[in-house]
Amino acid sequence: MELIASFSVDHTKIVPGIFTSRVDELGKFKVTTYDIRLKKPNREPVVDVSAMHSLEHLIATFLRNDPEIKDDVIYWGPMGCLTGFYLILKGNRAPRDIYGLVLRAFKSVITSETVPGTSPENCGNYLLHNLIMAKYYAEEFISYLEANAGNEDIFEYPKTERPKTDKGVQFYDS
């Protein structure tokens, strides 16, 4: 089987940032999946589950209400590894082009007084939220992005090279 795009990224070298994970053509439309990475995989603690859940609710609500982008938002949700989120948008913008949007989204968390959609009728795990920790992670990510805005490493994936035999057979992780 072919290795999917997100598994071909060298997770030992990736840093927090905004990356293009994949671009898909759906008929005459392009759809881009972005990796919004808050943590260095396997090198620092992941985002707390309850804070991740709150960040999901807060930023999904922000994106789907932001007049600049709401019509292009397809999905915002957490990565299973709890190191970041996937953002899927119509079109194909460069990661640097959504930098301001990502900053605005995370800054909106800082001023939030409640987490939307946290009643039993609105959420499948409504008790698993932590606004205080969501704000902590948002502030941490904002500071990091602002301090590293000129660093191309926060916009370009480090690619991993897969070993090949002399006959060109490529090896994959299990």
Image (tube, grey):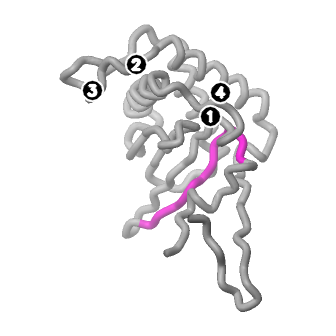
> How far apart, in angstroms, are the residues tagged by discs 2 and 1?
18 Å
Chief secondary structure of the magenta portion: strand
Image quarter of residue 143: top right
- In this image, 9 relative to 121: left or right? right
Q: In the picture, which quadrant includes the C terminus?
A: bottom right
Query: Mark on residue 123?
Result: 3
> How far apart, in angstroms, are the residues tagged by discs 1 and 3?
24 Å
- Residue contact between numbered discs 1 and 4, judged by CB atoms under 8 Å: yes
Q: Earlier in the sequence, mark 2 or mark 3?
A: 3
Q: Earlier in the sequence, mark 4 or mark 3?
A: 3
Q: Is residue 144 or residue 8 the one in the foreground?
A: 8
- In this image, 54 relative to 155: left or right? left
Furthest residue toward left: 121
Secondary structure of the residue carrying numbered label 1: loop
How crowded is the residue under tag 2: few (<14 C-alpha within 10 Å), some, or many (20+)? many
Closer to us: mark 4 or mark 2? 2
Would you name the residue on which mark 2 appears? Answer: 129
Picture residue at 43% right of the left edge, 8% below the top: 113
Would you name the residue on which mark 1 appears? Answer: 38
Q: Amino acid at mark 3?
A: Cys
Would you name the residue on which mark 4 appears? Answer: 141
Picture residue at 46% right of the left edge, 12% below the top: 112
Image quarter of residue 41: top right
- In this image, 133 relative to 67: left or right? right
Secondary structure of the residue carrying numbered label 3: loop
Q: Earlier in the sequence, mark 4 or mark 2?
A: 2
Picture residue at 56% right of the left edge, 29% below the top: 47
- Residue contact between numbered discs 2 and 3, judged by CB atoms under 8 Å: no
- In this image, 134 relative to 27: left or right? right
> How far apart, in angstroms, are the residues tagged by discs 1 and 4?
6 Å
Q: Which residues are magenta?
A: 14-25
